[in-house]
Amino acid sequence: MIEMNLGTTLLSLRNQKPLVHNITNFVVMNYTANALLAVGASPVMAHAPEEVEEMVGLAGSLVINIGTLSSTWVEGMEKAMVAACQLGKPVVLDPVGAGATTFRNDTLLRLLAAGTPSIIRGNASEIMALAGQQGQTRGVDSTQFSTEGLESAQMLCRQLGCVVSISGETDVVVGPESVAYISNGNPIMTRITGMGCTASALAGAFAAIAPNAFEAAVAAAAVMGVCGELAYEGAHLPGSFQMSFLDKLSSLSPAELDERVQITIENNG
Amino acid sequence: MIEMNLGTTLLSLRNQKPLVHNITNFVVMNYTANALLAVGASPVMAHAPEEVEEMVGLAGSLVINIGTLSSTWVEGMEKAMVAACQLGKPVVLDPVGAGATTFRNDTLLRLLAAGTPSIIRGNASEIMALAGQQGQTRGVDSTQFSTEGLESAQMLCRQLGCVVSISGETDVVVGPESVAYISNGNPIMTRITGMGCTASALAGAFAAIAPNAFEAAVAAAAVMGVCGELAYEGAHLPGSFQMSFLDKLSSLSPAELDERVQITIENNG
Amino acid sequence: MIEMNLGTTLLSLRNQKPLVHNITNFVVMNYTANALLAVGASPVMAHAPEEVEEMVGLAGSLVINIGTLSSTWVEGMEKAMVAACQLGKPVVLDPVGAGATTFRNDTLLRLLAAGTPSIIRGNASEIMALAGQQGQTRGVDSTQFSTEGLESAQMLCRQLGCVVSISGETDVVVGPESVAYISNGNPIMTRITGMGCTASALAGAFAAIAPNAFEAAVAAAAVMGVCGELAYEGAHLPGSFQMSFLDKLSSLSPAELDERVQITIENNG
């Protein structure tokens, strides 16, 4: 059923320990950094316009997350995006709160004008909002959430030429040729702040070492989901779960990942 | 002994899941967001002057915390305060470190000139410092800590027309008509950073759904205190306690809250 | 074997509860503040140029950490450094990522021009990069890591007249007259973000109360290492370890510290 060997990808991440450059929000910086360390990558956080270009040059990938943005940070994000694209380094964009404010929408347009991310990862409403800005203006029917989300992701994928990953009860990863559905995870993950941001950070880590962006986005979603299930087995409340999830990112074996992942891959289109 | 049905208020919070807009400090952002999620609310952190007005419009309440302030953040806080007051959304102000520096005192004056918070929550020294700026210049006798703190809170309540909540061994909530004394909690809470900030965030969550600011401030203090006691039962050291406290915010039942809260309410004046 | 009574120093810290003013990075602010509280100190985080001078005046020591720097923060760091030196308050400098970007190198030169820290604490590569800026331009041979690191630290100590503390498998503290080798700790500490930053924060706490900077740096390294060992006994994975380490900082007894520390002190030079 699994078309990719995700266990091998995880092993490769741990062997290569890629440096992931994060320009992310204040809420999740500590947790994201610990998650990257736990899974086997190496995080660096740097946002100043004065240094992001050099830092991108040292890193294997760049993760841009607009969770708590401000104008000087946007300047740093834009410079980092340009530098990463010039150097051919993969970029993951997390459009936190897309659609909520004009400032967020404008920032996303500005970043997408500066370069093309390898992967955009968000929840369905963020992906739909982002797609709306790109031309889709149909109303969103919450009962048709999945279908609308998938269509938005497919549109973004086609227009921008990037992989789009939607987190939800079932994670959906849309690539140019395939769509993957990963149905691991646990509802408690919506009760911990920054789980989506962590998924984006892991996508950045995998993008630095995977053969392509689609496989990186799938691996990140799979690791998140499987570790969420494993953590929940021993921790049913959010404080304990937050801690246990880091433990599982660290102890997850490649075999366990392959064994537990529930994934279906279809043709896109 | 209990004049309010705090369990019902907690249930109402969980049913309504209010969006709480926080402009808070870097130290506590992650913990505060997780505490809001754990208790049943929905947090958003946004500080940029470019977007705070729109974000306040989406939220049920606003929490302003000056813990790690800087000039651009103050601009955002001021705009958010004005917008919230215009829209009739409740505002909680946490005057972290009031009295410590001129910048903090000036910022607090500026924010209070921009609008009136529904609730001011701080420790006794912060409330006394804030009251001092409002005209009270008597010396503070630390042995008469409680009395001085209470008098400062009553003065602020009268002058500004807002509820004032003092955290301490006994929490004291001063409203226009009543004063509540909540004597739950555990001393270990002073050994975890951001417990006061968390109390303010919860006050914001309750303010979004409670019938009035007094009841919101009381509910927040009660939930903090009872969860502190419950968490301490199984976690006597600060790292474990920090985690367990989030668990208890999540698992606390309305009945347990009503059963364990130790509250006395008197007339104010 | 122990030349200093570290247990007595720890006891003194807990009795005096020094206020430690931190200008540090976004990633570690929460953990650092909790670590300072757990060990028995009192943290304050404040970075605005408008208030750092006043805040330094209230504090027992200043910790400057350039982990996520930006231009306005550098301005605050510089002002705080000048104020601390004028007031004779000890300063700990953590040159996070020294050598990685021009902005970091320039910032470090600017800070060292503004004042002399009592203690510089970093990992070997950061100390070597910092020493390189101070004149040392020899290539770094990673197999001779320890020797190169020690020579760099000795050079910085001589040139700047400050204590230099290198964190690693063995921590090395270089003072004007002595070099201490502390061989406690556990490799998992490299898998938790901000352990080095925490070591710097503790060095700040001890600097506020210890007889001299050398003893403060040694005490901080010893407490970190011993608590790392104690925490690992019950927590072999990073999420659990992060929590347990705070617990141990809080429960570590002076006698336990003296009993478990593995330290050798030699003459410097």
Image (spheres, coloured by chain):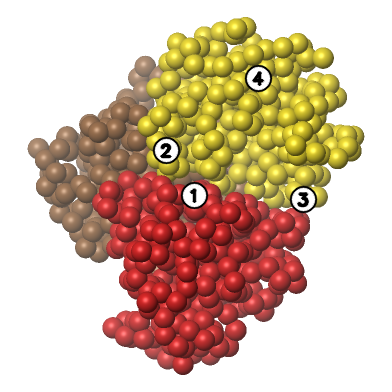
Chain colours: A brown, B yellow, C red
Q: Residues within 10 Å of mark 2 (few under 14, many from 20)?
A: few
In terms of image quadrants, where is residue B177?
top right
Q: Which of these two is toward me, B10 or B245?
A: B245
Q: Residues within 10 Å of mark 3 (few under 14, many from 20)?
A: some
Q: Which mark is residue B101?
A: 3
At a point 28% along the width and 49% down the height, the residue shown is C235
Callout 3 amino acid: Thr
Q: Quadrant of the N terminus of chain C?
A: bottom left
Circles 4 and 1: CB distance less than 8 Å?
A: no
Tell which residue pokes out farthest to the left in this image: A1
Q: Which of these two is toward me, B139 or B57?
A: B139
Callout 1 amino acid: Ala
Task: Measure the alpha-carbon separation of dots 4 and 1.
Answer: 29 Å
Indicate the position of residue C57 as horizontal and vertical percent values.
74, 60
Q: Is residue A101 left or right of residue B64?
A: left
| Residue assigned mark 4 | B181
Q: Nearer the viewer, mark 3 or mark 2?
A: 2
Mark 4 — on which chain does it sit? B
Task: Measure the alpha-carbon separation of dots 3 and 1.
Answer: 26 Å
Answer yes or no: are tags 3 and 1 on the same subunit.
Answer: no
Callout 2 amino acid: His
Q: Residues within 10 Å of mark 4 (few under 14, many from 20)?
A: many
Indicate the position of residue B189 as horizontal and vertical percent values.
53, 36
In terms of image quadrants, where is residue C105?
bottom right
| Residue assigned mark 2 | B236
Q: Secondary structure at mark 4?
A: strand
| Residue assigned mark 1 | C38
Q: Is residue C41 left or right of residue C86?
A: left
Q: Which of these two is toward me, B68 or C68?
A: B68
Q: Is residue B143 above or below residue C155?
A: above
Answer yes or no: are tags 3 and 4 on the same subunit.
Answer: yes
